[in-house]
Image: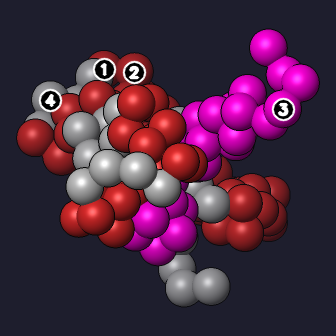
Amino acid sequence: MSAITRQMLRDYLNDALPDAELASVEKALRESAELRAIYHEVIEQEDRGEHTVGAIWRRERVSCPTRDQLGGYVLGAGDPDLIDYVDFHLKTIGCPYCQANLDDLRKASKPGKK
């Protein structure tokens, strides 16, 4: 894995990394006092509240599909361009929030579940 960036530390803090990266960042934090110091700076910045367009975009999950759109994806129904985007968002971006939402939808759609 390449160097751990501040953005990766923000994503780690917000539990927004794919599992493999999450484990790598956690391991690096355990092994490096310097990285832990940077991580504490990131926590302080987050606590103060960042107000950049990028921070707001990430915090509000502007790129994430809605639950209805994820439901359409599960059913394979809807606009093909949207289905392609949802597929990209889940498989390439690896959004853990949407992946958890998708898992929930799949469990709810199994026969015999209410």
Q: Residue at x 52, y 80 (%)?
A: 3
The x and y percentages for residue 7 are 39, 57
* Relative vertical location of residue 47 with respect to residue 79 in this rendering, above or below: above
* Pointer 4 residue: 51
Q: Residue at x 40, y 69 (%)?
A: 88
Q: In the structure shown, which secondary structural element does the residue marked by tag 3 occupy?
A: loop
Q: Amino acid at mark 2?
A: Asp
N-terminal of the pair, mark 2 or mark 3, is: 2
Q: In this rendering, does residue 71 appear at all?
A: yes
Q: Is residue 63 left or right of residue 29?
A: left
Q: Amino acid at mark 4?
A: His
Q: In this rendering, does residue 38 appear at all?
A: no
Closer to viewer: mark 3 or mark 1: 3
Callout 2 environment at 10 Å: few (<14), some (14 to 19), or many (20+)? few
Marks 1 & 2, CB-CB < 8 Å contact: yes
Callout 1 environment at 10 Å: few (<14), some (14 to 19), or many (20+)? few
Q: Specify the segment rendered in magenta.
A: 87-114
Which dot marks residue 111? 3
Closer to viewer: mark 4 or mark 1: 4
Task: Report which quarter residue 84 is drawn in.
Answer: bottom left
92 is within the stretch colored magenta: yes
